[in-house]
Amino acid sequence: MNGIAKQFSSIEQVTDQYFPQKSVNNSGKASDICFKDVLLQQQNKADGIDSNLKFSKHAAARLSSRNINLSSEQSRRLENGVQQAKEKGINESLVLVDSLAFIVNVPNQTVVTAMDQTETKSNVFTNIDGAVIM
């Protein structure tokens, strides 16, 4: 220990020598990408699905709090539903996949919220201009 103490006068010198700092390019912009989006994209790529569909923070929180886990097949069908809505010129769409309901901002390809069958009992959806049943 004394050998190290004679070579370095501070912990910062030890840290700098053994753990050099990499330069970080920080443009000052906050990223709009959340962990859940990145995880879903990577899972989709692993399953052979190249998804451009994003999940808002609200939708990601809803999926998590409601224990909703999309299978790769359900994700593919959701993507197809969004694509069909886009082809029909829908801006805000309800996409139904099995017992799951998704409100999607079609131009941004962003899932705004998600719910399961237990929360769709009222069967009333507002602020949409189209629906796709997959």
Image (tube, rainbow, N blue to C red):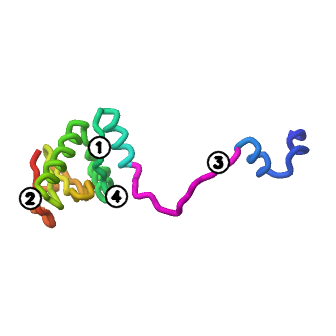
Three-letter amino acid code of the residue under disc 1: Ser
Name the residue beneath numbered marker 1. 51
Q: Earlier in the sequence, mark 4 or mark 3?
A: 3
For the N terminus, the image quarter is top right
Q: Is residue 122 visible?
A: no
Circles 4, 3 touching at the beta carbon (< 8 Å): no
Three-letter amino acid code of the residue under disc 2: Asn
Residue at the spot x=13%, y=56% of the render? Answer: 120
Is residue 33 a member of the stretch shown in magenta?
Answer: yes
| Label 4: how many Cα within 10 Å (few below 14, some 14–19, many 20+) | some
Q: Residue 134: name its quadrant.
A: top left
Start-end of magenta stretch = 20-35
Label 1, label 2: how many angstroms apart (C-alpha)? 28 Å
Number of the label disc, if any, that sits on residue 57? 4
- The x and y percentages for residue 126 are 13, 66
Label 2 vs label 3, nearer the camera = 3
